Image (tube, rainbow, N blue to C red):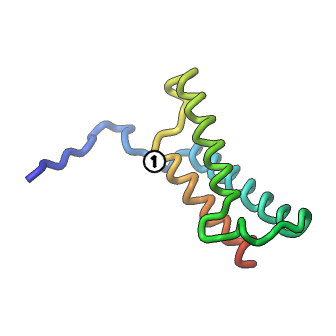
Amino acid sequence: MPELRYNTDAGAGRIVTMRAVGMGLVLAAGVNGWITYSEYLAQASRMNIGQFPLALFALFVVLVVGNALVQRLWPAGGLERGELLLSLSMGCVAAVVPTAGV
């Protein structure tokens, strides 16, 4: 049976950081603005408002590529996987507002 190992470093595994929450808020605002613009101002189809909105996917790809560039230039400055996941989760929750009209 494989042995489970946990990382016991003091700062390891920390997901909820101010920079992750900040990126999540930026992602949430971008998703809400994009979906609202495409539906009401551009009169686009509702095809981009699905279970996983295209606006969220596009902005998350920009975030991941930007994060890779930051990590290449400044290794300690990029977001970790957990922080990216938190930002994506915040974007998913925020995408409900313009799509479901909540």
Q: Which one is nearer the viewer's eye here, 80 or 43?
A: 43
Secondary element type, mark 1 = helix
Which x, y percent locates residue 44? 84, 66
Q: Is residue 11 above or below residue 54?
A: above
In this view, which residue lies farthest toward the top? 73
Q: Is residue 70 above or below residue 61?
A: above
Are there few (<14), some (14-19), or many (20+) residues within 10 Å of tag 1? some
Which x, y percent locates residue 11? 39, 38
Q: On the image, numbered disc 1 is attached to which residue?
A: 82
The residue lying at 31 percent from left, 37 percent from top is 9
Q: How many labels does the image show?
A: 1
Which x, y percent locates residue 102? 72, 78
Q: Which one is nearer the viewer's eye here, 47 or 33?
A: 47
The residue lying at 60 percent from left, 70 percent from top is 51
Q: Is residue 59 left or right of residue 16?
A: right
Looking at the picture, which amino acid does disc 1 mark?
Gly
The residue lying at 13 percent from left, 48 percent from top is 3
Which x, y percent locates residue 28? 69, 57
